[in-house]
Image: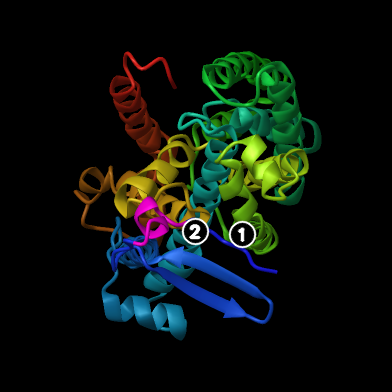
Amino acid sequence: MTTTTDVRPAAEKSGRASTAARPVRWWSGRVSFRMHRRTALMSGGALLLAALLLLVSLSVGSYPVSVPDVARALFYGTGDRLAVHFVNQERLPQALLAILAGCALGMSGAIFQSVSRNALASPDVIGFNSGAATGAILVIVTFGGAAASVAAGAIAGGLVTALLVSVLASRGGLHGIRLVLIGLGVTAMLGSVNSYLLTRSSLNDAQNAHIWLVGTLNGRGWSSVQIMAVALLLLVPLALLFGRRLRMMELGDDLATGLGVRVNRSRLALTVLGIGLCGVAVASAGPIPFIALAAPQIAVMVSRSPGVSLVSAGAVGAGLLSAAHLASSQFFSALVWADQQVGWIQVVEESQRNNLLPVGVTTAVLGGVYLAWVLFKRRGTGTA
C-alpha cells in the first residue's frame, strides 16, 4: 500500500521537473510517503523554527534562565530550584502543547480546505471549533471538567456540528460560499448556546470556561500534553494514510471516482479525522482561531506546491502557534520585570501576571488581518 502526501506539479507532469520539484521519498515495508523537495525543506524549516521558539520560551520570562541552566534543568533536573520549577513545570508543557496543538490545527485545516476545495473552510470559520467548545463547556458545567471528559465532549460537539453543517450545506456539494456562510451562521448560534451555558454554571466554572473560550495555554500541564500526544499518535498516521485520496479528491468527485477513490467514504473518514484533530486541540487549549485557517495556505505559498500537504500544514501550524504563544507570554514581561526584589511567592505571582494574555487573542488579531487580506485578494471573483 502506498500513501502520497503530495502530487506532482504541472512542470513535472510535462517532463520539465525542476530540481526543487523533484520528489523526496520515504519508505518502510509496504508503506511509503512521497513529498516534493521544496515542501520537505519548508516543513523541516517550520519544525526547526518551532524547536528554536521552544528553547527561547524556556529561557525568557519574568524569571530569566540561562541556556546552560535550561539544559541542566531539562536533562538532569538539577540547578537553581526556581529554574527547575519554571522550565520543567510551567514553560515546557505549554511550549510542547503549542507545538502539538498547532500541528493538529494545521492538519485539520488542510483536511477541510482540501475536502471542500475552499480556502476559507477551516474549522474555526465553519463552526467546528465552536461546536467542540460547546461540547467541552457542557462537560465542564455538568461533570466538573476532567481533562479526558473535556476532550471527549469537545470531539462529540465537533462531530455533531459537522453533521449539522454538512446536512445544511450538502446541496450542490460541500464547497463554495454556501459552506462558509452556513458555518458562520452555525458559529453565531453556538455562541449564544455557549453564553447560556455559562450563565447556568457556577461563578468559578464560568470564569474558567470564559478564559478557556478565548483560547489559552496558560496553566496547562503535563496531563494536557499527554492527551494531545496520544491523540496525535492515533490520528496523524490515519490522516497521512488518507493523503493520496485527499489529493485525488481535490481534482473533483468524478475524476477521483474514476481513479478508484470511494469519494463518499473517504470524505466521511477525512471529516471525522479533521474533527478529531481540531477537537483534541480545542479540548487542550480552547478554540484558538487563525491557525487552521492560515497554516495550510501559508504552506502552499511558501512551498509553491500545487495543493495542500498535510505534513507541511501541520509543521507551519506548529511554528505559528509557537510564535504566537511566545509573543503572548512575553507581552507583559516588560511591565512585570520592573520589580527586581523577588522571592519564591512573588516570582510565582509574577509568572501568572506574565501569562495574562491568552494566545487566542494574538491569533485572533492575526487571523482577522489574514481573513481581510484573503477576501481582498478574491474581490470581484465571485469565489470564497
Q: Residue furthest front?
A: 14
Name the residue: 49% across, 38% down: 288
* Residue 249 is at least partly visible in this image: yes
Name which of mark 2 and mark 1 comes first in the sequence.
1
The answer to whether residue 282 is left or right of residue 156 is: left
Percent of width and height locating residue 140: 72, 35
Q: Is residue 329 above or below residue 87?
A: above
The residue tagged 2 is 311
Above-or-below relation of 111 to 1 = above
Query: For residue 240, which numbered disc appears in the image?
Result: 1
SS class, disc 1: helix
Label 1 environment density (alpha carbons within 10 Å; few <14, some 14–19, many ≥20): some
Q: Residues within 10 Å of mark 2 (few under 14, many from 20)?
A: many
Where in the figure is residue 95, as x and y percent of width and height? Answer: 44, 59
Of residue 239 and residue 279, the one placed in the foreground of this image is 239
**SS of the residue at dot 2?**
helix
Cβ–Cβ under 8 Å for marks 2 and 1:
yes
Is residue 11 rendered magenta in the image? Answer: yes
The residue positioned 77% from the left and 45% from the top of the image is 149
Residue at image position (22%, 51%) is 339
Q: Is residue 179 above or below residue 71?
A: above
> How far apart are the alpha carbons under marks 2 and 1?
8 Å
Three-letter code for the amino acid on which mark 1 is drawn: Leu
Q: Is residue 26 magenta?
A: no
Q: Position of residue 329 (x, y in %)?
A: 35, 48
Dividing the picture into quadrants, the one containing residue 297 is: top left
Which of the 4 image quadrants contains residue 18? bottom left
Check disc 2 and give the amino acid type.
Val
Q: Which residues are magenta?
A: 8-15
Residue 245 drawn at (x, y percent): 64, 51
> Where is residue 249, by image quadrant?
top right
Q: Is residue 34 left or right of residue 42?
A: right
